Image (tube, rainbow, N blue to C red):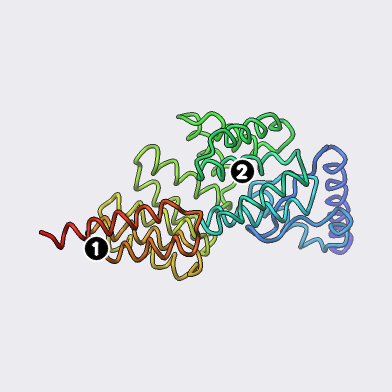
Amino acid sequence: MKRTTNLLRFWLLMGLVALVSLGCGRRPAQALHQGDRYDATLAQEQALSESLIAEQAQIRADVMPVTTDSERALQRFLQARKYRHDFTHLAESGKLLEEAVAIDPGFALAYVYLSMHYGTHGNQAARQAALARAWALRDRVSPGEQLFITAMYHGGPSALASWEKLVDMYPGDAYAHLILGYAYKNEYARYQDALKCFQEALALDGTLGNAYNMLGYTYIALDDMSHAEEAFRTYIDLFPDSGNPYDSMGDLCLKTGRYEEAAGFFEQAYQLEPTMTWSRDKAAEARLLMQRETQR
């Protein structure tokens, strides 16, 4: 009897998968494991065991879907998103996102992340164009992605409500917690709430670089320099070949009057990632402050 029930449940699940696939013009290609695995095709899904299908369904319910027609585009996007939220390999992240939208011009979420990339590098015209493209595609994606796009497009108080709702919808999504933490810290100075978000993101993904980064800056805002340094040093340990961890440590040293150390960290950041011209500028500032201090 149990075997019959399990088989019935299996084929019911298969029927649901088929109905969902027939009913959607674009297939949500949900990551099976945060950041590095992606959806199997329908044929592969039919070969999975009942337990694995149930596991996939649970993960999909817990993490925001990513909608694209192309697995090649998806692979590039997932790697670019990982780089973005580690705040490492920034140039490569932008290149991967541009490749993703070239492969799938209807890839809405990739356009959103491309807008972030352009904004980081000061290209506001390209940022606005990418956001406008994502907005135009919003009706073709999942409800979670629609929330994400709307929050990025409109900003302001309504964006915070969207980020909070996104976390409620996808409590197992480390990126959702991370982005809500950004909003709490950077836009509303709600530092304790931000700390909780970054800590929750790290509980879900202990390798999420920018969660350590933002944890460090939040501790600085709370005047807790010891915990800030601990967070930044963990960030460096995780990504020793990337520039931003050293830039962040340089900011802490600059803030605490350790100008020579700050200059060294900034110079190392710029050497590792020459696109980070702000690190070069901050190194010069730290050297100038160091000279002024020695002349007193």
Residue depicted at x 50% and y 39%: 164
Q: Which residue is more in the foreground, 104 or 59?
A: 104
> As shown in the figure, which amino acid type bears the numbered disc 2?
Leu
Q: Secondary structure at mark 2?
A: helix
Crowd rating for badge 2 (residues with CA inside 10 Å; few <14, some 14–19, many 20+) = many
Q: Is residue 281 left or right of residue 111?
A: left
Q: Quadrant of residue 135?
A: top right
> As shown in the figure, which amino acid type bears the numbered disc 1?
Arg
Q: Quadrant of residue 23?
A: top right
Q: Which quadrant is the N terminus positioned in?
A: bottom right
Establish if 141 lies above or below 75: above
Q: Quadrant of residue 22?
A: top right
Residue depicted at x 43% and y 59%: 212
As measured in the structure, the alpha-carbon distance from the residue carrying label 1 to the one carrying label 2 is: 36 Å
Upstream in sequence: badge 1 or badge 2: 2
Question: Residue 214 location in percent, x, y?
Answer: 41, 53
Q: Which quadrant is the C terminus positioned in?
A: bottom left
Q: Which residue is more in the foreground, 56 or 107?
A: 107
Q: Is residue 183 left or right of residue 42?
A: left
Q: Which residue is more in the foreground, 11 or 267?
A: 267
Question: Residue 69 location in percent, x, y?
Answer: 80, 45
Residue depicted at x 51% and y 45%: 121
Residue wearing tag 1: 258
Residue wearing tag 2: 114
Question: Residue 97 location in percent, x, y?
Answer: 66, 48
Are the two marked residues, 1 and 2, in contact with CB atoms closer than 8 angstroms?
no
Q: Is residue 235 left or right of residue 94?
A: left
